[in-house]
Each structure stands twice: as C-alpha cells, then as structure tokens.
Image: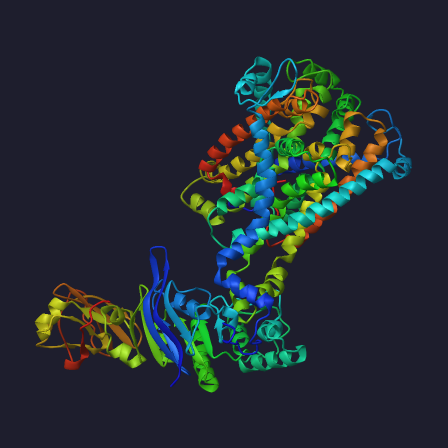
C-alpha cells in the first residue's frame, strides 16, 4: 500500500465499476440511430438519421422542452438568491437555530422526493391553488436551494473572514464590501451551483409529477413514453439529446470549481 | 456618527451608508435579513406542506362514502400493519438494504482507487467518471436499462452470442429473483436501483478515504503491519463513515422511489408506488400520508445511528 | 501631546471568557506603541476593538478624542495590516493597494498613481500587475502595508505582521517598519508576542496577560524594572525569586526579579547553588541552577569556565540587580 502501484485486482475492479456506470448511457446513443421502431432489438438491424427529423417536427417535444427550460431558469434564479442568503448567514456567524437552518435546507433532498411531492400536492389542494407554471417552480426551487447553498457555503468558508474586515477597514460599507469583495470571490461557486441547480431542475420528475397537473415538462413527457410508449425512436432521440444537454452544465460546474471546492456529495 | 470622517470618504453618508451603519451596530439584524427569505420559503412552504401531509395521516377514510373523515385517529396507521401493507414495507426495506450493500461493494474499489492511486489527469477522469453519471438524467438512466434488460435487448443477445441462453433461462426460472424476462424481475429492479444510486455511494467513500493522511498509513507500515493489515485495521475503519454517509443516500433514495419499480419490475409494489397509488387512483390520502411517514421514520432511525458513527463529517 | 487612542475601562467578554478586562490605555499621537503578550492575552482583541471589528462589552474607546461606539470600521481614521495580510485574491497588487481610494471615489488614473507611489515606498515597484497568489510571504506583507498606508490613516494597526516571515526577513522588516514610522509620523499600534520585536521597535510597550495590562512603559523600564513576576518572566526570561527567599535576602517580603546576565559565579560568599544543566547559546552559556529549591538561571560570558552538572558553586550579583516587585502578580 505504500507503493504507488495498485494491485491488478483493484485496477480491474475500479475499471469495471466505471464501465458499469458509463456503458448503459452510451447505449442510448446507439439506439438513437436504429431503424427498428417497434421493439428494443439489439443489435440494431440498421442505422438511420430519420428519427432526428421526426423528433424535430414534433410540437409536443418542443412544448415540453420549452416548459422545462423556463421552469429550470426561474427555479435556478430563486435558488441562487435563497441559497446565497442562507449560506452567508450560516457560514459567517453563529446564531441560535443555525443547525436547524442547515437541516431545513437539506431536508428537501434528504427525504425521498415522493414525500416532498405529495406534501406540496396536498398543500396545494388544501389551499385551493390550481396547478400552474408556478406550482412546478415552487417545488423545484425548494430542492434546488440546497445545491446552491452547498457550493456557496463551501466557498464562504474558504474565503478568509479577514477579507471582509479588510474591505471595511479600507472604508467600504457593507454594500460596497458585498459588491467589490464578496461577490467576486463567490461568483464562480455561485455559477457552478446555478448550473447544477439548473441541471437538477431540468431533469426532475418525481416531485414534478405531483405539482404539474396536466402540464408536461420534458422528463414528464419521457416518463409517459416509458410507461405507454407511442413512438420509441423519438424517445431514443430525446434521451440522447437530454444526455448531451445535461453534460454541459455539469462539465462547466466541474471546471469552475476544479481545484477549489469539491462539488461532490452535492446530493442530488 | 457621520462626523468621524475617514480621510477621503464623504462626511455625510447616503441612505446605503446609513443602512450599513445600522447593520454594523446591530449584527443580529443583518443575520435576520439574510435568513428571513430562505427561512420563510422553506419554513412556510416546505415545512408547512410537510406538516399538512403528516396531519392527514391522522385522519381516516370513510369505508362507505370514500370521503376523508376529519377526526383524529390512529386507525390509518393500524392499516399499515395489515399483511399486504407490511409486505410492501418489508419488500422495500429488503430492496434498499441489498442495493446499499451491493453499491458499497462495487463502489469501494472505484473510490479507493480514485482516492489512493489516481493522480493528475487520471484523478480528474475518475472524478468526472463518477460525477457525470451522478448528474445525468435519471429517466434516461432508467430508460437505458429498459433497453438493456428487454427480452430482445443487449443482455439477451450477449447470452445468446456466448451460447449461454440456457443459463439466463435457468436464472429466470428461479423463484423471487426470476421472472418472465429480466425487465419484469426483481433482479432487474435491483440492477437499475444499483446503477442509478451507485455514484451517491462512491463520492462520500472517496471523500473519506482522501482525508486519511498518507503518513498514517506509513505509520501503520512502520509499526510492522502488512499492507493487508493496514487496510483492515486502519483504512477500513476510517473509510466506514464514508460508507455510512453513502448508504444514507442509497437507502433513502431506494425507499422513496416509485418510478424504477414501475418501469422495470414485477407487479409487487414498493412503498413509493403504494404512496403514489393511494393518493392518486385510490384517493386515500390519509393512508398515502401514513405510508409516507414510514420512510421518514426509517430514515430518522438510520440518520440517528449514522450520526453516532460520525458519518456526517464525510458528507 | 494629543492622545490618538484611549481605552477607558474597556472590557470585551465572550460569555464567561474575559478576553479584555477593564483595560485603561492611552496611545499618544505619533507614537510607536507595541502590545506584547502571549496568545490569548487579549492584545489582538484590543487591536480589533480599535479597528471596530469588535465592540466593547463595557467601557469606551476614544479615537482622537471622539467616542467610537457608534462608528463603524469604514468611518474610522485607522487602517489595519492583518496577520494573514487579507489581500483580495481577485484583484492584482495595484488594485489591492488602490482599493481604499477607489471606495473613497478617487478617479482611476489618480488612484493608480497613488498606489504605484505607495508600492515604491515599500520597495515593491514592478509588482503592480501580479496577483497576490504570485507573491512570497514577505512581498504580501509589503503590499498589505502599502494598501493600508496609501489611505493616510491617522493610526496604523499592525496585527503580528511579521509573524509569518523567517528570521532574517523579520529582522530586516523590523528596521524598515521603524524607519517608515519615523518618516511618516503616523501612530503605529503593533501587536506581537515576540518580546525582542516589541522592545527593539516600540517607543512604549504594554504587556498583556489574561485580558489585563500588566505594565506599560518604555522598553528599558519594562526590561530593567518589571512590576510583576509575569512581566519579569515573559520579557527576557528574568529569574523570579519567591517572596520567602527575597525576605531572607533583603528583609522585605515581595517577589523580586533578577536578570540572568547579572548573576555571576564567585569563589566565596553569596549563595550556594547546584548546577542542574547548561546550554551553549553562542556568545554566552546558560547555566541552570538550583538554590535551595528555587530554580535560577545565569548567563556566563564566553571564555569563562563552565561547571559540570551536579557541581556545587557559589553565586552572587550586584546589589542593584535585584529588583523588588511590590505589586505582586496582577
């Protein structure tokens, strides 16, 4: 173990683990080009690009995509504001109820999504709130806060407290200090948190099934297709596009926080 | 207060300056202003909804009219102990436990290699190799397994190509784990759960292993321990909080999921599906709420034990 | 002479912990004032009270005669050099130095010129474009100094500014800081746990222990005439003789300090002592002795014969080397 070389067994086990995590996703790419449209036949009897055109012409896919993007954008903005405020309060100071606040932030992802979903749904029912764009956003922002919070709180902790004092010492009031010192120092963490929150919201299905009513976000659309398949090749193409689209913010978040904080355990 | 002018600053502070002065004099006010919006959002919207749900679990459904009777009762909780409902709970817990155990076994070597041996580019590769599956679309991941496990899918093809179809059929004819095809068997459900939650196990283990200083392992070797002994007596105990932290995710996520068993699995339900059906088609919100309390309770106990084992430092 | 900073019965308590306990203090304008004490003695808290990062639990701090209770840090005519320098990592050196001027509303060209001049003053020209992360510890320290001084504060607060530097650099910076202070005429309040640093640089020194000031005075007074056993022990490691022993020697019952360099070996008379150890320190050798149960140390100049451990020797000292401390330990 002192030597820097791992045993062959360990190498194989680690490589097998990684392959297990990646091969199934890659499989999606192959299926997007299959000519078979009735079953999940492997290997594909032939390859074609025609399903991309078919998918492109489907208004229901576009509507679902548009709804998902709008929900993710608004939820991310709300999560950014709430998560940053919360992180600032918790990271800098000790106050009564501090532990309770961090627990409260984590709870929406610590509890199974179905509980968050069914709670919100019964609350909407009790309060007679009809399902709308905003009921979806309400649910998404609630569990996205923690992602921003985790990123921001880690950066706040790493940012030396004396920077704020130095700024005030040099004549900057609280707002100037926020504008010129705090914000530039946490901006990449916020950007990373925002990207992950966006990816999380864009992909969320469990809570959304309870808060969307008749509206279809892209994941809801996919779920419908999985339960009652209508045109399998279109689902294949959408799945591939979703994989590609979510990779970008994840890679972006990784490069923004690389070598500084870790985005690990951001618990989705 | 404005007359103590700092050299260069204007003597009369503007409204922002006066607000800032106030926040300096009353640091409590600053914290209150910071914490108020998130506390209101999460406290009122989220906790409010959660309590609304919990409250419903103490109501019951009138067996004749099918309407909710708003009288406090424990009878709904009593229904949980009916044999068919207990089956659902036990089945779910058994699934969560086996998924957690398998994830720990498969995840440990990956985390161990990434934390101890991978350097430079390989380290980044391993990190992304875990992060990408973690964050990629849940539904797409489930979908890809539907493709893999389908009767005409890649796994059947693989067995056929290797002339091992008889083996697959023998396995599928086994009770409990088998079924008509892999995609409608417990084995299928288990595989998908394992696949989807595995990254959640790897990251905390890796974080825990990375915190073990190299000098500690060298000290163990210096004191005469063979590598296997160092692994057994030093590394494993120190990695355990990471395993427990990871198991919180895998266990909790399996307990509450209703989509995976719906898409890949048998007709026997799990807790998530039961909650979904009771609140949806059956319209029995009180029983759905009572069912929802079960994972909360199980996770409460789990978290309590995990905290005692120091797992939260590894999150 | 104007009083720059005055503490009037200032206390800062954290729950049961009295970090600063009823401290009275006056720092004169233009003075190089050192706050000396071990860690946790309250000296840094005093500095932070002056800067406004902490608020007194009781008592009042006046800065140039004006009460400061309601004045936030950004309106105080003081600037701080932080122990960890606290340079803004997202700004280059020039923008770091110009930060205070930027906040004060000075134009870009003007404040950049001022920043470059300040960098020149601390012997750092040509580093303006660098990020703080690309500087060494000593260079950061100079930038932090320039960043504070460019605002022309009336009082400069320095929190262990040389603590992170190696010995050679530290000695060089001590000379430079002292020169800078003379040249600018600004009041310096300097926190350190290094008695040598305090004694060599400061006009006056306040010795802190457990939140209280043990003694304030010129370095010579602190060194030669410590008022409490703590000061005697902490500043230059004097021997502290217990009251019983002092009573036998002088007839007065009080603690007394005796500098080790004042103790010499003699062939007869004086006190009998047993040698318990010796340490070679270069120019001198430190002998540790046991005098009837009281540990004592003596410094022998180079060239003198050094007795072996276990030897019996006789020691003596000049009459005025024994300094009685009537105040006891505060």
- Is residue B179 in sight in this rendering? yes
Judge by depth and name the residue closer to the eye, B7 or C120.
B7
Q: Which residue occupies 47% across, 37% down?
A: B307
Q: Is residue B135 above or below residue A157?
A: above
Residue C287 rendering spot, x and y as whole percentages: 22, 70
Judge by depth and name the residue closer to the eye, C33 or C256.
C33
Residue C185 rendering spot, x and y as whole percentages: 45, 85
Q: Is residue A232 above or below residue B114?
A: above
How many marks on residues?
0
Residue B255 rendering spot, x and y as whole percentages: 60, 28
Judge by depth and name the residue closer to the eye, C54 or B88.
C54
C229 left or right of B209 in image: left
Q: Which residue occupies 47% across, 83% down?
A: C180
Residue A92 rendering spot, x and y as whole percentages: 51, 55
Asked which quadrant contains residue C273, the reply is bottom left
Q: Is residue B127 above or below residue C193?
A: above
- Is residue B105 in sight in this rendering? no
Q: What color scheme is it?
A: rainbow
Judge by depth and name the residue closer to the eye, C172 or B260.
B260
């Amino acid at each position: 173990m002192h030597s820097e070389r791992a045993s062959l067994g360990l190498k194989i086990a680690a490589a097998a683990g990684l392959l297990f995590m990646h091969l199934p996703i890659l499989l999606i790419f192959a299926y997007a080009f299959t000519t078979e449209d009735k079953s999940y036949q492997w290997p594909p009897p032939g390859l074609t690009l025609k399903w991309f055109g078919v998918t492109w012409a489907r208004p229901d896919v576009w509507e679902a995509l548009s709804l998902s993007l709008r929900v993710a954008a608004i939820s991310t903005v709300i999560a950014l504001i709430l998560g940053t405020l919360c992180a600032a309060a918790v990271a800098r100071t000790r106050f009564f109820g501090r532990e309770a606040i961090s627990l409260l932030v984590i709870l929406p992802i610590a509890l199974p999504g179905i509980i968050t979903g069914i709670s919100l749904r019964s609350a909407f029912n009790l309060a007679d709130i009809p399902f709308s764009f905003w009921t979806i956003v309400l649910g998404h922002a609630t569990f996205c806060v923690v992602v921003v919070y985790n990123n921001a709180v880690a950066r706040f902790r790493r940012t030396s407290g004396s920077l704020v004092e130095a700024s005030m010492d040099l004549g900057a009031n609280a707002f100037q200090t926020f504008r010129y010192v705090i914000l530039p120092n946490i901006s990449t963490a916020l950007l990373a948190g925002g990207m992950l929150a966006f990816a999380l919201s864009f992909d969320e299905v469990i809570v959304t099934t309870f808060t969307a009513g008749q509206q279809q976000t892209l994941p809801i659309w996919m779920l419908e297709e999985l339960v009652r398949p209508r045109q399998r090749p279109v689902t294949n193409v959408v799945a591939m596009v979703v994989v590609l689209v979510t990779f970008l913010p994840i890679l972006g978040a990784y490069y923004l926080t690389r070598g500084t904080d870790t985005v690990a355990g951001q618990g989705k | 207060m404005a007359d103590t002018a700092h050299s260069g600053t204007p003597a009369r502070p503007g409204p922002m300056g006066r607000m800032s002065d106030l926040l300096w004099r009353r640091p409590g006010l600053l914290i209150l202003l910071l914490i108020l919006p998130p506390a209101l959002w999460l406290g009122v919207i989220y906790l409010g909804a959660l309590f609304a749900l919990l409250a419903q679990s103490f109501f019951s459904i009138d067996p004749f009219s099918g309407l909710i009777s708003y009288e406090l009762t424990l009878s709904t909780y009593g229904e949980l102990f009916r044999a068919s409902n207990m089956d659902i709970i036990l089945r779910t817990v058994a699934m969560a436990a086996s998924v957690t155990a398998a994830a720990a076994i498969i995840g440990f070597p990956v985390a161990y290699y990434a934390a101890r041996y991978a350097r430079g580019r390989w380290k980044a590769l391993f990190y992304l190799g875990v992060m990408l599956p973690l964050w990629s679309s849940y539904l797409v991941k489930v979908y890809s397994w539907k493709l893999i496990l389908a009767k005409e899918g890649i796994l059947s093809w693989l067995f056929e190509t290797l002339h091992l179809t008889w083996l697959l059929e023998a396995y599928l004819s086994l009770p409990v784990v088998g079924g008509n095809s892999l995609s409608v068997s417990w084995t299928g459900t288990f595989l998908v759960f394992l696949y989807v939650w595995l990254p959640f196990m790897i990251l905390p283990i890796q974080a825990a292993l990375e915190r073990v200083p190299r000098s500690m392992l060298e000290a163990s070797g210096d004191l005469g321990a063979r590598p296997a002994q160092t692994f057994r007596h030093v590394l494993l105990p120190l990695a355990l909080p990471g395993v427990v932290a990871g198991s919180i995710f895998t266990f909790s996520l399996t307990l509450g999921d209703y989509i995976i068993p719906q898409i890949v699995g048998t007709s026997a339900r799990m807790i998530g599906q039961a909650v979904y059906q009771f609140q949806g088609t059956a319209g029995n919100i009180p029983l759905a709420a009572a069912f929802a309390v079960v994972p909360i309770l199980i996770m409460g106990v789990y978290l309590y034990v995990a905290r005692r084992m120091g797992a939260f430092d590894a999150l | 002479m104007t009083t720059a900073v005055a503490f009037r019965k200032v206390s800062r308590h954290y729950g049961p912990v009295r970090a600063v306990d009823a401290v009275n203090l006056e720092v004169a304008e233009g003075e190089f004032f050192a706050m000396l004490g071990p860690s946790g003695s309250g000296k840094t808290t005093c500095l932070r009270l002056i800067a406004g990062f902490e608020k007194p639990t009781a008592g009042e701090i006046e800065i140039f005669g004006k009460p400061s209770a309601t004045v936030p840090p950004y309106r105080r005519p003081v600037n701080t050099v932080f122990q960890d320098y606290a340079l803004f990592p997202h700004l280059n050196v020039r923008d770091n130095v110009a930060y205070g001027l930027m906040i004060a509303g000075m134009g870009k060209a003007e404040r950049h010129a001022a920043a470059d001049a300040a960098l020149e003053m601390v012997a750092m020209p040509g580093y303006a474009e660098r990020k703080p992360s690309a500087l060494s510890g000593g260079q950061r320290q100079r930038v932090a100094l320039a960043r504070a001084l460019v605002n022309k504060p009336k009082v400069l607060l320095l929190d262990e500014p040389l603590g992170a530097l190696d010995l050679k650099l530290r000695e060089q910076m001590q000379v430079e800081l002292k020169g800078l202070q003379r040249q600018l005429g600004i009041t310096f309040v300097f926190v350190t746990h290094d008695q040598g640093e305090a004694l060599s640089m400061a006009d006056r020194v306040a010795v802190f222990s457990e939140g209280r000031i043990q003694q304030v005075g010129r370095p010579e007074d602190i060194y030669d005439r410590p008022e409490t056993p703590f000061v005697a022990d902490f500043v230059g490691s004097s021997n502290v003789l217990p009251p019983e022993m002092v009573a036998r020697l002088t007839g007065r019952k009080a603690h007394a300090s005796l500098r080790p360099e004042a103790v010499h070996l003699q062939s007869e008379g004086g006190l009998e002592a047993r040698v318990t150890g010796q340490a070679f320190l270069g120019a001198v050798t430190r002998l540790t002795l046991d005098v009837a149960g009281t540990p004592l140390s003596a410094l022998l100049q180079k060239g003198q014969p050094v007795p072996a451990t276990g030897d019996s020797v006789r020691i003596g000292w000049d009459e005025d080397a024994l300094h009685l401390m009537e105040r006891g330990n505060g």
